[in-house]
Image (spheres, helix red, strand yellow):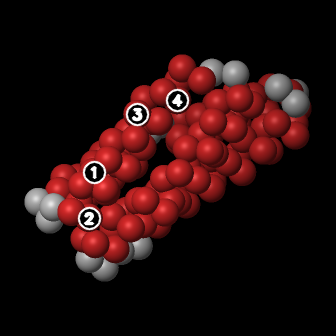
Amino acid sequence: MTNEEIIEAERLITSIKSDLAIVAGGATNAEERANLVLEKVPDILVSLAQLAEILESAEDYSRIQDGMSILLALAEMAQRRPEYHEMLARAIMMLRIGCGLDKVAQNLCAVKLQQSA
């Protein structure tokens, strides 16, 4: 992995984490939350695909991509049925906690250290 690829992967991870933070905390009501998911998740999916390509480990990200697909489905349902708003809120928090981007970032730091040694 080149230094440029590491830098690009770190940029993508930062972008994904930022978008997830916006989705998790950027809405003042349930309807806004659903709209944020529908707005941000497609961008997150593109960034995840780019990250998987750089790291050559697409299977590691299928779990995250599946979670994003679930968020999109819940957001679409929440626009029609209010009882889905709480399910969407729980799913956002679970995905933020469990997506593992911090671990990927740590691994990239370790690679950088090995390359500079």
Q: Report, in whole angstroms, how far the alpha carbon at label 1 lies from the one at label 2.
A: 9 Å
**Which three-letter amino acid code belongs to the residue tagged 1?**
Leu
Query: Above or below — where is 72 with respect to 25?
Result: above
**Residue 100 left/right relative to 111:** left
**Residue 68 left/right relative to 14:** left
User: How many numbered marks have been drawn onto this rendered protein structure?
Assistant: 4
| Mark drawn on residue 65 | none
Q: Report, in whole angstroms, how far the alpha carbon at label 1 lies from the one at label 3.
A: 12 Å
Q: Nearer the viewer, mark 3 or mark 4?
A: 3
Disc 2 + disc 4, Cβ < 8 Å: no
Residue at the spot of label 2: 79
| Mark drawn on residue 66 | 3
**Residue 101 left/right relative to 79:** right
Residue at 54% x, 35% y is 103
The residue nearer to you, when weighing 10 against 57, is: 57
For marks 3 and 4, the one nearer the N-term is: 4
Q: Quadrant of residue 7?
A: top right
For residue 25, say whether it is visible.
no
Q: Which of marks 2 and 4 is in front?
A: 2
Q: Report, in whole angstroms, how far the alpha carbon at label 1 lies from the one at label 4.
A: 20 Å
For marks 1 and 4, the one nearer the N-term is: 4
The residue nearer to you, when weighing 104 against 89, is: 89
Residue at the spot of label 1: 74
